[in-house]
Amino acid sequence: MKPKLNIHTIVLCLTGILFIAGLFYISWTIRQQINSANSDFSTFEEQLQDQKNSLESAQSAFAYAIQSEKDILNWRAHKADGISSAAQEADPDPNASSDTKPSIFSQNTAPEYNDFSDENADSDSNNIWSDSDDTSENYDSDQPVA
C-alpha cells in the first residue's frame, strides 16, 4: 500500500522550505548592511585622515609663520642693537667704566722673558737685550721688515 500524501505533510514541507529561504534572505540583507556600514566607515576614516592631514599642515604652517615672525623680530632687535651699539661706540659715556683688556705684550709668559735672575744675565742666548750684530746681517736694507 502506498502512503497517501497528506495535506499536513505538504504544508509542513512548504513551511520548512519557506523558513530556509527566509533565513538565506535575512543573512543576505544583513551581509549587505554590514558591507555598507564598512564602506561608510572606511569613507569616514578617509575623511577623518584627510582632516587630520589638513590640520597638521595648517598647524605646521602656523608654527612656521610664528617662528619666522619671531626670527624677524629678533633680527630687527639685533639690527637695532647693532645701530645703537655703534652709536654708543662713537659717543661713549664718560661716566661708564669700560673694561679694557690688557695688552697682549703684558700677557707673555715665556720663561726667557720672565726670568730676571742674575744667573741668566751673562748668557747671550737667554738675553734678548744683547747688542749682537748678527741680526742686522740677516736682513737686507731694501726689504721691509714685517
Image (cartoon, rainbow, N blue to C red):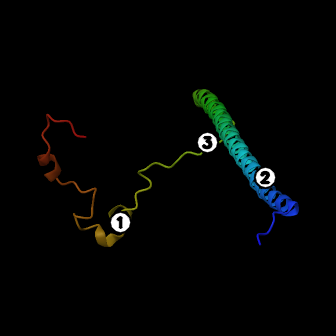
Please, what is the three-letter code of the amino acid marked with disc 1? Pro
The answer to which of 140 and 55 lies nearer the viewer is 55
What residue is shown with label 3? 98
Find the distance from the CA under tag 1 to the CA under tag 2.
Answer: 105 Å
The part of the image, by quadrant, that contains residue 21 is: bottom right
**Is any part of residue 112 visible from this angle?**
yes
Disc 1 is placed on an element classified as helix
CA neighbours of label 3 inside 10 A, class few (<14), some (14 to 19), many (20+): few
Say left or right for 89 vs 35. Answer: left
Find the distance from the CA under tag 3 to the CA under tag 1.
Answer: 31 Å
Mark 1 or 2, closer to the camera: 2
Residue name at image x 61 percent, y 32 percent = 75
The part of the image, by quadrant, that contains residue 9 is: bottom right
**Which mark is first along the chain, 2 or 3?**
2
> What is the x, y in percent for residue 45?
70, 45
What residue is shown with label 1? 111
